[in-house]
Amino acid sequence: MSQFSVQIKWFRKRVQFQWGEINVCLDFTKGYGYIIELEKMTSEANKEQEYEHLKQRLKSLKVEITPKEEFDRKYIEYKENWKHLTKD
């Protein structure tokens, strides 16, 4: 018998694509909702500049960045209720 138990499961559909030089992941997680993630490889020296560029790209889509506190709160809520939220 395993000493580990399942604490959380994610049932996710992911679409990945390139948006110019940006890697984009659009996820739909059952019981959680949509998440968009933008990623661009850069040097440490350009990190802040590229972060601002990514924020502007999201803004062009009319997508607001979710504050970390809200993300953390939603994660805890999902973790406590995932079995109910993912039932068919």
Image (cartoon, helix red, strand yellow):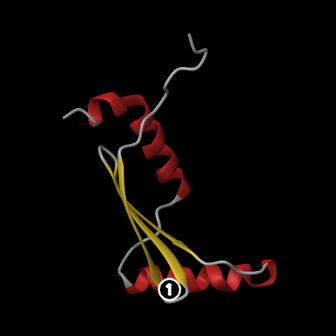
Residue projecting furthest to the front: 1
Tell me what residue is drawn at x 61 percent, y 15 percent: 3
Helix, strand or loop at disc 1? helix
Q: Which residue is mark 1?
A: 56
Please name whichever residue, 40 or 60, is drawn nearer the observer in this view of the structure: 40
Residue projecting furthest to the top: 1
Quick check: 79 above or below 37?
Answer: above
Left or right position of 49 against 14: right
- From the top left corner, tell me how far across and down residue 37 is, in percent: 48, 67
Please name whichever residue, 75 or 37, is drawn nearer the observer in this view of the structure: 37
- From the top left corner, tell me how far across and down residue 30 is, in percent: 30, 46
Quadrant where the C terminus is found in the figure: top left
- From the top left corner, tell me how far across and down residue 28 is, in percent: 33, 56
Residue projecting furthest to the left: 88
Badge 1 local density, few (<14 within 10 Å), some, or many (20+)?
few
Residue projecting furthest to the bottom: 20
Tell me what residue is drawn at x 52 percent, y 46 percent: 72
**How many marks overall?**
1
Left or right position of 51 against 37: right
Left or right position of 35 against 39: left
Quadrant where the N terminus is found in the figure: top right
Tell me what residue is drawn at x 43 percent, y 45 percent: 74
Tell me what residue is drawn at x 81 percent, y 83 percent: 45
Disc 1 marks a residue whose amino acid type is Gln
**Residue 35, picture quadrant:** bottom left
Quick check: 7 above or below 46?
Answer: above
- From the top left corner, tell me how far across and down residue 68 is, in percent: 55, 56
